[in-house]
């Protein structure tokens, strides 16, 4: 047998998810218990374990599950599977168990350790939790001991000063928790071509004007630039439609454009794609939404919007809600608040699409703002952190509890909260043991974040339609977002580029 495989089997034997199984393993044996989050195992923890082992031949370490850690937006930084694996790798630790409770009181009462060890800092900090623990320990005649405190370390301080790069370890532990492999992600992407998807939303033309500064700020605070080159990219709901079509899925796209140079650009781009059926609402006296980015030395100096955000009328809405464009497996509402979506139209659109199997919405808080609470009873929402905070009027709380509140209030089945360079948090429904998980950003070299959310929306949606599994969906969406971020402008993400990245990280999987 391969030594690495043998080692993994031995480590897995040390990890328990059930107290009954642990009790069966340590029946009638004297053991000591250490409990904590163990987000990063540091020298302070190791000193505590060495000290604990003096009192009993068996050391059990219990780990608070992800569900009950709310120290910060990104805590736990290390998910519970990886935290357990980290601890189990230490020879001094005999058994590791996940405690799926906010406090270890029930666990202590059930497994009845002979000794319970806590850090020295808790001896002086006689808080409510320590008092509750003492009460339970006295009941079961377990000795409460505080470890020596000549040096005190903190996982939080280590994480704040320097976050370790463990994105692949997190990714593979998540896959492992669902008994998934990279090959399963590849098979999921291959099935996208079998889907039929409706997309309704605001089309945007992203213009990039490369420039150099030629002067300014002599008589007034005005910068003078010279435009060297202009490039046009499809954006908004239109690029979402193109991402989905690139996978081979059949797309029916409804949107509003003007009768101008930008509308002709959009029409020409879609003419090249055979598997998209377009329902263009042409508005004569309204420009096609354009966002012109003035870029100097790869820095966006200024953005100039050419837009009319006035609301569409009943006739226009009826035109967009053509029944022939919504006889599909799923629908994506890509809402940038440039006229199609508002307080009056969203309830009507939601009612119109209520019988479609899978419903997704993405509302952007950028130059305009929308409110996620308008979208009730959807299968998936993919907001960023700012949009969640705006919807609940809460700027300060930890984001995961806010996500739970939002899901409950609008009866959303899945919520993927994008955090920019910090990755994605998935808030899950009640059918899962783990109520949320965090995946770090996979971006190695950021070039242009514009369009990252669009590519994430497209690929995570298709994956959810195929698998109903949020872990594979967040991973595939994050890969698409990574590829988008490492290129200038909104470039269509192809399945081939996804496969190339999956092939690359599959090498890591073999060694995990």
Image (cartoon, rainbow, N blue to C red):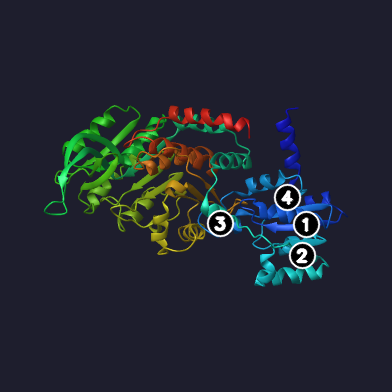
Q: Nearer the viewer, residue 162 or 15?
A: 162
The residue beneath circle 2 is: 145
Q: Work out how far the residue at label 2 is from the one at label 4, CA to CA, in angstroms.
A: 20 Å
Q: Which is nearer the N-term, disc 2 or disc 4?
A: 4
Structural crowding at the residue carrying mark 4, measured as other residues with C-alpha within 10 Å and reported as few (<14), some (14–19) or many (≥20) = many
Question: Can the viewer see residue 327 in this picture?
Answer: no
The image shows residue 177, relative to residue 109, as above or below, that is: above
Q: Quadrant of the C terminus?
A: top right
Q: Position of residue 233 (x, y in %)?
A: 27, 36
The residue beneath circle 4 is: 96
State the SS at label 2.
strand
State the SS at label 1.
helix
Q: Position of residue 347 (x, y in %)?
A: 35, 56
The quadrant where residue 259 appears: top left
Q: Work out how far the residue at label 1 is from the one at label 3, CA to CA, in angstroms.
A: 24 Å
Residue at screen point 43% across, 56% down? 376
Q: Work out how far the residue at label 4 is from the one at label 1, CA to CA, in angstroms.
A: 14 Å
Q: Work out how far the residue at label 3 is from the one at label 2, CA to CA, in angstroms.
A: 25 Å
The residue beneath circle 3 is: 157
Q: Position of residue 470 (x, y in %)?
A: 53, 44
State the SS at label 4.
strand
The residue beneath circle 1 is: 52
Question: Can the viewer see residue 492 in this picture?
Answer: yes
């Amino acid at each position: 047998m391969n030594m690495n495989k043998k080692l993994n089997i031995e480590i897995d034997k040390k990890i328990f998810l059930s107290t009954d199984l642990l009790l069966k393993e340590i029946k009638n044996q004297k053991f000591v218990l250490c409990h904590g989050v163990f987000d990063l195992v540091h020298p302070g923890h190791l000193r505590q374990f060495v000290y604990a082992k003096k009192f009993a031949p068996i050391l059990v370490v219990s780990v608070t599950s992800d569900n009950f850690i709310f120290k910060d937006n990104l805590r736990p930084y290390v998910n519970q599977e990886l935290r357990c694996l980290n601890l189990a790798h230490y020879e001094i630790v005999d058994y590791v168990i996940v405690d799926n409770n906010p406090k270890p009181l029930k666990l202590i009462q059930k497994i009845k350790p002979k000794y319970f060890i806590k850090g020295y800092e808790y001896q002086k900090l006689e808080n409510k939790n320590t008092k509750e623990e003492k009460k339970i320990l006295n009941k079961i005649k377990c000795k409460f001991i505080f470890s020596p405190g000549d040096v005190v370390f903190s996982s939080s301080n280590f994480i704040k000063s320097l976050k370790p790069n463990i994105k692949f370890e997190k990714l593979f532990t998540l896959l492992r928790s669902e008994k998934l492999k990279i090959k399963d992600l590849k098979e999921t992407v291959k099935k996208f071509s079998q889907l039929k998807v409706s997309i309704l939303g605001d089309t945007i033309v992203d213009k990039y004007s490369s420039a150099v500064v030629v002067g300014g700020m002599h008589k007034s605070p005005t910068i003078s630039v010279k435009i060297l080159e202009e490039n046009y990219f499809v954006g908004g709901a239109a690029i979402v439609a193109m991402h989905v079509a690139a996978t081979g899925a059949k797309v029916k796209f409804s949107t509003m454009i003007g009768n101008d140079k930008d509308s002709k650009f959009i029409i020409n781009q879609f003419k090249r794609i055979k598997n998209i059926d377009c329902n263009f609402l042409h508005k004569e006296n309204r420009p096609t939404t354009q966002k012109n980015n003035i870029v100097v030395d790869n820095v966006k100096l200024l953005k100039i919007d050419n837009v009319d955000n006035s609301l569409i009328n009943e006739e226009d809405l009826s035109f967009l809600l053509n029944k022939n464009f919504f006889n599909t497996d799923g629908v994506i509402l890509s809402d940038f608040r440039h006229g199609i979506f508002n307080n009056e139209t969203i309830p009507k659109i939601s009612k119109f699409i209520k019988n479609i199997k899978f419903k997704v919405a993405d509302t952007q808080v950028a130059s305009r703002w929308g409110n996620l609470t308008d979208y009730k009873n959807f299968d998936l929402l993919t907001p960023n952190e700012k949009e969640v905070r705006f919807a609940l009027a809460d700027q300060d709380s930890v984001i995961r509890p806010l996500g739970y509140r939002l899901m409950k209030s609008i009866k959303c089945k899945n919520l993927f909260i994008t955090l920019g360079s910090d990755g994605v948090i998935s808030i899950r429904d009640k059918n899962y043991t783990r109520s949320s998980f965090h995946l770090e950003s996979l971006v190695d070299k950021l070039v242009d974040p514009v369009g990252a959310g669009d590519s994430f929306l497209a690929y995570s949606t298709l994956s959810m339609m195929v698998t109903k599994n949020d872990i594979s969906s967040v991973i595939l969406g994050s890969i698409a977002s990574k590829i988008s971020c490492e290129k200038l402008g909104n470039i269509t993400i192809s399945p081939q580029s996804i496969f190339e990245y999956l092939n690359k990280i599959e090498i890591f999987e073999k060694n995990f």
